[in-house]
Amino acid sequence: KKFKCPTCDKAFIRNYTLQCHMLIHKNVKEHKCETCGKEFTLLKHLQRHHLVHTGEKPYKCHLCGRAFSQQGSLQAHSRTHTGIKPYKCQICGRAFALQSPLMSHMKTHSNEKNFKCETCGKAFTHRNTLARHQLIHSGTRPYKCEECGKTFTQTNDLKRHSRIHTGIRPYKCHVCSKSFTVEFTLVCHLRTHTGERPYVCDHCGKTFTQP
């Protein structure tokens, strides 16, 4: 690996791969989804994202059979079975199953919000979050439930809604086998077993299992 990134020291075999990688540091996102407005640095990332809209889910969990449109989503889901969260915030100790949510979380400590909505003035840490937020103002609801026709601005809202029809509770506690429809509910439940109370009141110091 002879081509080295001057910003993060990551090395690559081909110069072309290095140049693509460096776009991440420059925050260049030239590839935009025409359905929801989400932007990507690389074309292959946009192509992967399109699976969210088409409904194609080629990545399947071998433990519970749940399928996903992206490999990273399957990896994150797999950790709901094991409870493993290897990426830990050095400031507050909160842990994550994947590195990308940790990086997003770190910005909450710095209060860095560079992307501002021109309609209402609300600011966001990520351009993609701003793009999703702007769907509220435009009235665009690109995600539609096949069962009842209800529409949503975000794909996660549609996924949660769909479980009303299917009754599927894909997030299972590996300690007591209790299952949940929403991953965050499982995360909060796991703290009843571990005793973890990561949310601290700034005024009295009392701790809680959820925000």
Image (cartoon, rainbow, N blue to C red):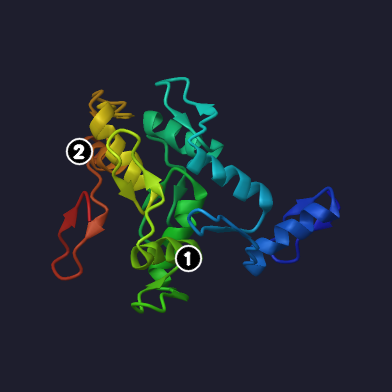
The kind of residue on which mark 1 rests is His
Q: Secondary structure at mark 1?
A: loop
Coordinates of residue 45 in the picture (x, y in percent): 62, 49
Residue on which the image places disc 2: 192
Coordinates of residue 57 in the picture (x, y in percent): 51, 31
Residue 166 higher or lower than 112, as above or below = above
Residue 171 higher or lower than 198, as above or below = above
The answer to whether 89 appears left or right of 15 in the picture is left
Dividing the picture into quadrants, the one containing residue 162 is: top left
Q: Residues within 10 Å of mark 2 (few under 14, many from 20)?
A: few
The answer to whether 198 appears left or right of 72 in the picture is left
Q: Does residue 182 show up?
A: no
- Marking on residue 126: 1
Q: Give me the C-alpha separation between circle 2 and circle 1.
A: 32 Å
Q: Between 44 and 143, which is closer to the camera in this rendering? A: 143
Residue 131 higher or lower than 75, as above or below = below
Coordinates of residue 10 in the picture (x, y in percent): 72, 55
